[in-house]
Image (cartoon, helix red, strand yellow):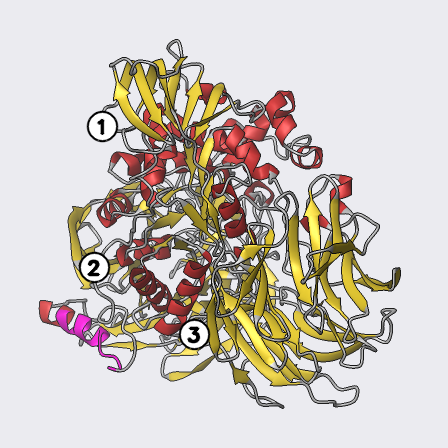
Amino acid sequence: MRPLVLTLSMLLSSMACAKKKDAESWDIEESYKYSQSWKATLSTGTWLNVDVHPDGAQIAFDLLGDLYLLPLEGGEARVLSRGPAWDQDPRFSPDGERLLYVSDRGGNQDLWVMDLASGETSRLTEGAPERFAEGTWSPDGRYVVARKRVIDTRSIGMSELWLFDTRGGDGVQLTETKAHPFPTEATFSKDGKHLYFSSTPWRFDYGRDPNQGVFDLHRMDLETGEVVRLTAEAGSAFRPTVNPVSGEVALMQRKAGATVLTLFDPETGARRPLGDRVFEHDNQEGFVLNGLYPHAAWTPDGKTLVIWDDGTLVRVDGATGQATPISWTADVALDLAEHVRFEVPVAREDTVQARAIRWPTVSPQGDRVVFEAFGRLWLQALGGGPASPITPPDRRAVAPSWSPDGARLVYATWTDADAGAVVVRDMASGSERTLTAVPAQYLAPAFSPDGQRVAWLRGSGATLRGLDTSQELWFRLEIWDDGAVSDGGEYGGSYGGNRAHRLAWSADGARLLLVDDEPQDKPHTHDKTVLVSVDPDGRDRRVVARWDRATEVAVSPDGRRVAYVENFHVYAADLPLVGDQTLELGPKDGALPVTSLSEGSGGWLSWAGDQVTWSLGRELHVGDATHTLDASLPRAAREGRYAYVNARVLTMGEAGVIDGATVLIDGERVVSVGAEPPPQGVPVVDLGGKTLLPGFIDVHAHLHYGASDVQPQASWRHRVNLAYGVTSAHDPSAHNDTVFATSERIEAGLELGPRTWSTGWILYGAKAKGRSWIASYEDALAHVRRQKAWGAVSVKSYQQPAREQRQWVLNAARAEGINVYPEGGGDLFNNMNMLVDGHTGIEHALPVAPLYDDVIGLYAASGAGYTPTLLVAYGGLSGENWFYQTESLLEDEKFLTFTPAWWVDRSVRRRGVLVNDDDWYFKEVARSAAALSEAGVPVNLGAHGQIQGVGVHWELWALGEAMGPEAALRAATINGAWYIGVDKDLGSVEPGKLADLIVLDGDPLADLRVTMNLVEVVKGGVRYDPDTLEVIE
C-alpha cells in the first residue's frame, strides 16, 4: 500500500471537480451569494470525526465543514476540501485510495467519494428529501453502509441502515424502523460478515435516562439478516469501533454520569473499561443526528485508538487506556453570507390595520363581504370604501354565514363570562335573534338552502369547566328549525385547537356535509382529510371525497364543486355523483381534473354563488377579482407626562447604571434620563432608590393561546407574562389565526398583554398536513409572503431537510425584508452552516457543550444571535426540571392568581425528576452560551412557554448563573430587542424609546433573583400593579 501524498494541484482539482454541476440547477456554493469571509488558525475543535489512513501515518478529520489531513503525530493540518459546502465525517477506503465523506454540496446531505490521487469526486447517494450520514466501508472496499434519516410527520424522524455498491445502484435497505427506529454508527466486523451498530427500540423522546440504558450494541449477520442484541446494560453501548487486529469492539458508555471507553469481546460478551479517562458528553439524550459520539478509528496495528476529546484529538493506548493529545493547527477560511436582519418599527402609526382577517364571507349577490377582525364582524362593500363594524365590542363574533337570499347573517358569539351563542342578524334593520339557549362554544353555523334551518357545531362546555376553548372533548351537530333544536350526533372533527371547516348543506337540504379527519393505521402518519355526508340526525355517514393533506375544504352551494387547500395553495374540482364510491382528490389531476386557483397562498375558503372566494391577509379573491379588506382601529396610546425620581436606572444602553436618576415620560415614550429634576408641574413618582430597567423581552415565547376559532376576550397566558414583567414577546411558532389576531387586539387596547410578534406558522419540513413543501425559490417566496401578509415580522425555517431549501428561504426573506429564525433541531453541523448562510440567529441550544474555538469563532464572525432556551436545553436534562425541583410555586400567590388551577395541578404538584447536582447538563449549555457572549455573540432570553411568566425569570437566572447578572439582563432586554429588530424603540431606557419598564425592589446586579420583586410594570407609559394588573393612576 502506497503512502498518502497529496499535492496542492490535487487539492485544487478536488475542489474544482466538486463544483461541476448542471448549470441549470441550484448550486449551494455558486448560486448563493457569499460576500464575507472569516479566517482563523485553530488548535481546538468541536465534535471532530476522525479516521486513520491504512498506512498508519496520516489521519483525516473534519473541522467547520471542511476536511483536513494531519500526520498521526500532529502538526499543521492540510486542507482536503474547502468551500461553502459542508463536508464532514471522512472515512478512508481500505486500500487508502479513496475518501468517503458526508456533504451537502449537491444541495442535500448525501455521501460522496473523493479519489485521493486525482481529486475527483462523485456522489454516492441521492436521498432528497431524506438525508444520508455516517458512511462506513466494507473491508473489501466494494460496499458502503450508511444511515438514512427518514422523515415522517415528526421532523426528528427515524433512521434506516442502507447498503450501497460503490459502482452504482439505488442501494439495499438493511433495517426496518419497526424493529430499529433509530439505528446508528454502523461498522463492519473484521471479516466483513457482520455489521455492528448502535440501536434503541424507541423513537426519540425527551427526558430519556441513559443511566437506565438507551442504546445497545447489535450485530447483523449479513448472510442471514439475523440481528442479535449484544448488550443491555446501564449507561448504554455506542460508537462501536472494531479493532482491525483483535476484532474487539471499542464502545462508549455513560458510567457514574460520565462518558467512558470500554472494550467488548464479541466472542465471549465480556466488556471491560479501557482506562479511566472521562470523555466529552455523549449525545444519547439528544436527537443523535450526527451519532452518539464522533467517529473514532484504530491504527492499522490495532494498538491505538484515535478519538476526539477535550476539544482536540487524542491517541488512546489500546492496552492501558492512557491518552496522549495530538497537537495540531489548522488554517480555516470560510465564506460567509450577509447576515439577515431587518428593523421592525414599533408603535410608529396612529392606527392598527387588521391583517389577521378571518372568515371573509361574500354575499350571494357578490356585492358585500362580512369578515372578522379585532374580534368583531365588519361589513364592507366590494369595490367601495373601508369596512365598518356591525357587532359590539363587548363580545366576540366569529364564523359569519349568509342566508341564501343575502338578507340575513348567522354567526357565533363569545364572551369569557357567559360563553357563546348562535345569532341571526337582519342585515337591513340590524335586529338580531339568538337561536341557542345553552351557553357553549359554537362553530360554523350555516343556513339550509331554503333559509329556514340553521346547522352548527356545539362544544362540550370546556370553558364552563374552567378549561380553554381548545380543550373541548367533542362537538355535536345540531340543527335549528323554527325554534326547535335537534341533535345530529357527536362529531369527531378535531376542531379543538384547529380551524373549523365551514358546514355545508346538500342542494336539496336533505343532507349535511362536514369535514373530518380519517386516522391511518400506520404510526406517525398524518390523518387524511375526508368530506363526509350525513342525514340531519347524523346517521347514514358516507365518505364523499378524500385528500392526503387538505387543510381546508368548502363545498359549493349546488354541491357540484369543491374547493380545498393543500400546501397552502387553493384548488377546485368537480364533485360528480359516483354512487357509494369515494373520490380521491389532491393538488394534481387524478381521477378528475383539478384546477389551481391561487398563484401563491390562500385560505379561508368560501363560495359566492358559483365563484370560489379565498383570502390572504387583507387580500380577498372572488373568482378573478381581487379586493382589499380594510378594517382598522386607533392604536392604544396614553397621553400626558410624569416622571420617576430617585431611581436607580439600569439603562442597558451606553449610559450604563445611573443612581438617583429622573426618568421623564411623555405619552408612551421616554423623554429624558439623567440627574436633572423633572419640569415644574409634572407629576412625580418617587421610587426611593428602587431599580428601574427595561421590561423583559422574551424572544422565544410560545404563548400557546389555547384557542381555535373562538378566541377568549382575555388570554391568561398574556396576562401572566405581563404581570411578571414581560412587556414584549416574540413567538417563533404559532397558528396564524390566533397569534396575529391577539397581537392586533393588544395593540388596539382590546386585550392586556405584552407586545406580541410572531413567525406564525412554521415553515415545517416534515410530512405533516401543514408542512411547507419547498422545491424551488418560488415556493419559498410564496411561503414567506403568506406569513408576511398575516403580519409576521419573521419566519421560522423549521427542519427543512435540505440546505438548498434553507437558502431559498433566506433569499426570499431578503427579498421581503423579513427575519429568519431557524429551528436549531439539535444538529450541530446544520447549525454551523446556518450561520455560514446568514440566518438571523439560531433558536434552541447547540447540542454540544462545551464549545471550542471553532464554533465560538464562527458564531461571533457570523453576526447571528443565539437563543439557548435553557429550560428545554438539548443534550441532557433541561433547566425546567431543575427549577421545578428547587422552587416552590405553590407558595407564589401571584402565580396561583394568574394561572388556572388545572394547569397548576397538572404541571406543578408532581415535579417529575429528582436528580443529582452533577447531572444537570443545561448548566454546561449555559456556560457555553456565556462563552459565546464573551466572544461578542448576542445571547437572548427565550423561555419557550414552559411556564408562563415565571419561566422568563427561571431562564434569566439560569443565564445569570453562567454569565453573570449584567450579561443575563442584557440578554433579557437590549439583546432580545436587537435580535427581533425592535431595538430602535425598545430594550433600553433611553430618550425616544417606548416606556416599557419594570420597577424592582432590590438590585438585580447584586442578586438576580430580586427580579421577582416587581413593584410596577410599565408598558407604553401605562403603569400596572404587577399583583393585579390594575392601572396605577
Of 368 and 952, which appears nearest the observer? 368
Mark 2 or 3, nearer chain start: 2
Kind of residue at badge 3: Gly
Does the magenta run of residues contain 796?
A: no
Read off the magenta span.
12-23
Kind of residue indicated by mark 1 = Glu
Task: Name the residue at the top extreme.
Answer: 688
For disc 2, the marked residue is 69
Residue type, numbered disc 2: Leu
- Label 3 vs label 1: CA separation? 51 Å
Residue that badge 1 annotates: 654
Q: Are marks 1 and 2 in contact (CB under 8 Å)?
A: no
Local packing at callout 1 (Cα closer than 10 Å; few below 14, some 14-19, many 20+) is few
Which badge, 3 or 1, comes first in the chain's sequence? 3
Q: Which residue is mark 3?
A: 127
Horizontal side of 667 relative to 561 (left or right) equals: left
